[in-house]
Amino acid sequence: MTTLEDCRALDAQDPLRAMRDLFDLPKGVIYLDGNSLGALPKATAARVAQTVTAEWGQELIRAWNSAGWVHAPQQLGNRIAKLIGAGAGEVVATDTASINLYKVLSAAMHISAADAPGRKRVVSERNNFPTDLYIAESLCRERGFELVLVEPEEVDAAIDDRLAILMLTHVNYRTGAMHDMAAVTAKAHAASALTVWDLCHSVGAVPVDLTGAKADFSIGCTYKYLNGGPGAPAFVWVNPKHTDRFWQPLSGWFGHAAPFEFTPDYRPASGIGRYLCGTQSAIAMAALDCGLQPFEATEPMGGMAALRRKSLALTDLYIRLVEERCADAGFGLATPRDHAKRGSQVCLTRTEGAYAIVQALIARGVIGDFRAGDGKKHLDILRFGFTPLYVGFEDVWHAVEHLREVMASGEWRRPEFNQKNAVT
Ligand SMILES: *Cc1c(COP(=O)(O)O)cnc(C)c1O
């Protein structure tokens, strides 16, 4: 049996332990929802204040040049690129994940029509994050494509000579299951199809190698594991072999080759700059800068490889402790045990009471979240994200102890835990 002392010993040996000091976390809170909204880096408040008072307040319009606001999407993009195996000049930070998905899926449809004419099928997973499916649904309708949704285990079989674009989320938001990006991409390419990868639950959570996998398009958000703040700018990557082939559909002036020439006609920038659209929030970009700094601080300890080792150790420990200490509480496990197939979260399933159990944990300061229905199996999900930058092994112990107490006492049955909020 694993003990509290074992967990403390793991913390003592943890090379990333000091990273937690880079974050402002409320006292008494064990935060297991960094996969939904990352924690606040200590540097952010002062940096945002400086952007507002010194840059905006004193520099006014000059700050676009003097404070470098105009280059922030590219500069932040270059730093994100290092976390996802992309090259310099291949990523921009901009807009939202949903909007960026619209841009890349549209470009992928154009390229597919040119290179594999007649193919009209876009395949994704039925349990993909809904916004991805909604964006795909509308684009397919507009462009005469057919959206086919399959179960995760059916993806392989759906790769055939009818497939134009395979649009997948690398790590599933609901289960934490991870695809083998290189293998799936190779299979899609062998069938002359293109791949679009959503990295919302991967970037900053697991090592990603877009270049090595020869992926075609990718997008992701930065307010989850990258700690960019609520509504932080998302990012977009396009394989350089595709970037200049087509306009993305949101041909705004920031994607123009020379926006400040104010010409009446659109001439797209060469390179990833054409994936910009309009003016971005300089304040949000400043916050994202601070979100990326802790990742750069881990570089001497091994960067993403070290974060991944700790992430797997945390999720392994959580699974083991739940099985040892909450064995009779009726939980199933939706997250794969196989390390190669697991993101940085653990999802427990339950036939009843999942929402109330999560609420009871939150009342005790253990913040995870609830996601309804595991598709056809009708199992609700209790979702816990383990962000190795600021979650420790002792936190895992206490999180499981709270869960054990909530179940053993029946506390979760209280009426106040059974009323649903707007955001779950
Ligand atoms: C969080 C998430 C999004 C969010 O999209 P926004 O446009 O930032 O709201 C999209 N896709 C996936 C897979 C996500 O996990």
Image (cartoon, helix red, strand yellow):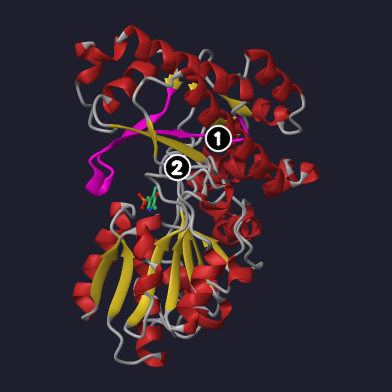
Residue linked to disc 2: 335
Element type at mark 2: loop
Nearer the N terminus, badge 2 or badge 1?
Answer: 1
Residue ranking furthest to the right: 300
Decide if residue 378 is on the left or right side of residue 312.
left
Decide if residue 240 is on the left or right side of residue 366.
right
Residue linked to disc 1: 315
Q: Does the magenta stretch include residue 385?
A: yes
Q: Is residue 81 magenta?
A: no
Q: Which of 38 and 371 is in front in this view?
A: 371
Given the image, on which type of amino acid does mark 2 rest? Thr
**Label 1 near label 2: C-beta < 8 Å?**
yes
- Give the percent coordinates (x, y) of residue 398: 53, 16
- Give the percent coordinates (x, y) of residue 417: 25, 17
Q: Nearer the viewer, residue 134 or 61?
A: 134
Is label 2's Cβ within 8 Å of ligand 1?
no
Q: Give the range drawn in magenta.
A: 367-390
Given the image, on which type of amino acid does mark 1 rest? Thr
- The residue at the point 41 percent across, 71 percent down is 253
- The residue at the point 58 percent across, 41 percent down is 291
Question: Does the image show residue 160?
Answer: yes
Question: Does the image show residue 261?
Answer: no
- The residue at the point 25 percent across, 71 percent down is 147
